[in-house]
Image: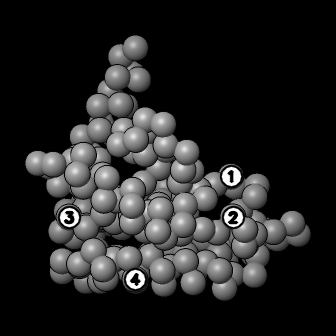
Amino acid sequence: MSLTQQQQFLRNEALGSSIRAASPRPRTLYRAGATEADKKSFRCDMRSKLVEFGNKYRECVTSDDHLKNIDKLLGFLCEKEMLEKENITFGVAQKMLNLYLKYEWCHGMIPEPPHCPIDSKVLKKVENDSKIKWTEMLREEYISAMFKIKKHAEPESVGEWELRVFNEENDAYCHS
């Protein structure tokens, strides 16, 4: 699929934002001694991998297949020598993929993805006293959180609910 200049711009912004937002803390994402060339190489590889995954979502993807894609992305991240392995979790992988898919969906490039990005704000909305940190989230904790989100979101879809919550919180921040 060939993209217009505008679509390419939006994709580039979505890719950069998704990678940055999923980094627990940029200084701890990379191993000590990682060079700027290493970091650039990682960002380029990560962009290519997210686009590759995004292309799979041109058709509807099941929740089970989506979980497998997060697993594959986590495996890809864990293979990267310049990254701190203890900071690469299922939570980081889900945030990166889910946020990128949210951008693609909002830009009209794909149908609504099966899950939404999970971060501290989403966790707090569904479980006010949640002790889980999205940056440390394991696969089982993610599945449990997504189940709670689906129940909390009804009758809205997970994506529509998360988008509404995100927009309401940002609107409230700007008007306070």
| x and y percentages locating residue 81 in the rendered image | 75, 81
Residue at (39%, 61%) from the top-left corner? 144
At 43% from the left and 35% from the top, the residue drawn is 128
Q: Quadrant of the N terminus?
A: bottom left
Dot 4, how many residues are within 10 Å of its Cα: few (below 14), some (14-19), or many (20+)? few
Residue at 37% x, 31% y is 170
Q: Tell me: residue 63, above or below residue 18.
A: below
In terms of image quadrants, where is residue 115? bottom left
Measured as percent of width and height from the top left, residue 169 is found at 35, 31
Q: What amino acid is found at the position of numbered circle 2 in the picture?
A: Asn
Sequence order check, earlier mark of 3 and 4: 4
Disc number placed over residue 112 in the picture, else none: 3
Would you name the residue on which mark 4 appears?
68
Identify the disc placed on residue 25.
1
Look at mark 2 in the image and give the residue it sits on.
87
Distance between mark 2 and mark 4 Cα atoms: 20 Å
